[in-house]
Image: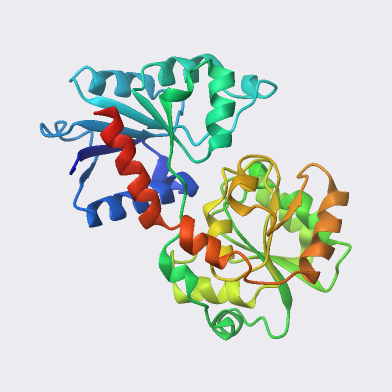
Amino acid sequence: MQHNILFGAYPWAFDCPGGGERQLMAWKSHLEAQNHQVTLYNPWEPVPENVKIFHYFSVMPGSYQLCEYIKSKEIRLVISPNLWVTPKTKWHYPHDEIQRLISIADLLIVNSQQEAATLSEVYSLPAERFHVAYNGVEESFLKPGNPELFREQFLLGEKKFFINVANIEPRKNQLTFLKALKHFPELSLIVIGHARDESYFRSCREVGGDQFVYIGPLPYGSDILKSALAGAEGFVMPSTVETPSIAALEAAASGCRVLITRVGSTTEYFGDEVVYINPDDSRTIVEGIVTLLQGVQGKLQKSIRDKFTWVHSARQLSLAYQKVL
């Protein structure tokens, strides 16, 4: 069944895009490849008359009025919270505002069974209000990159490095990782992404010194990005929480060894094939680095090819739309 869907997000979402925005655009591309019609919400134009579903990405404060208005047009409301919250952490977020917003959703699209379970508990929602559509990777990441391209472009020589593809901000926890990396003076951390928090970025530079290399964003899916992954000793994502990190999935698909936070839904995606760390404990990060360097690369590729591509994900999402209609 073909669907006409309107995608929406908070106004500044794409000013400094992250995983949620990557998810939105990947789903748009792959739904359209499956002959669904996807329109991006534009406040300067009327809501298209043929739309049956409004899919809103995020539970950012201030979203309720827009979602309520569009739902008043007899359009079904689907929300992707992209949120990891527990009973202990719910007041770290605008809890009442989030609860108000998701209470009017006809269906909540989550990235894992674990996310569904935690949101169900925190917001007292029945299981049938959730539908899992796993995050994915573009199949191009399954082809190995040429490690020399990245080394040559950024004059890295024989430098050994870890790659972190993420915005620089406290949630991504690069600062704690850099402190742990002091135990490995021969290694560097190369960060590819936006500096979302300038003060935190300066702290990373001060603490990391020569071991911290900031590249900035690279074109998504580009040969140079794949080359960076191919040349790294491993990919690291020491975040305080991940659901589950699209960048880590892409790194694993490319054959890179992965070190990642245990907090969030990461275990549902990566199983026993990555190194997990406690983001608040430098000791576990140091131990994780040692384990990562001893590990085998490429063990996750088949699993990702079979279960976690955007083609698979878009099919799961299409089933959700069929359910809500």
Query: In the rendering, at what x and y percent does residue 131 appear?
Result: 42, 33
Q: Is residue 205 above or below residue 63?
A: below
Q: In this view, does 48 lie above or below 157?
A: above
Q: How many marks?
A: 0
| Of 36 and 231, the residue lying toward us | 36
The chosen color scheme is: rainbow
- Residue 188 lies in what quarter of the image? bottom right
The x, y position of residue 205, in whole percent, is: 72, 58
- Image quarter in which the N terminus is found: top left
Give the farthest residue toward the left: 49
Residue 124 relative to residue 266: left or right: left
Q: Which residue is drawn at 14% across and 31% down?
A: 46
Q: Can residue 101 be seen in this view?
A: yes
Q: Is residue 217 visible?
A: no
Q: Quadrant of residue 221?
A: bottom left
- Vertical side of 323 occupied by 283: above or below: below
- 61 displayed left or right of 166: left
Q: Where's residue 320, x and y in %? A: 33, 36
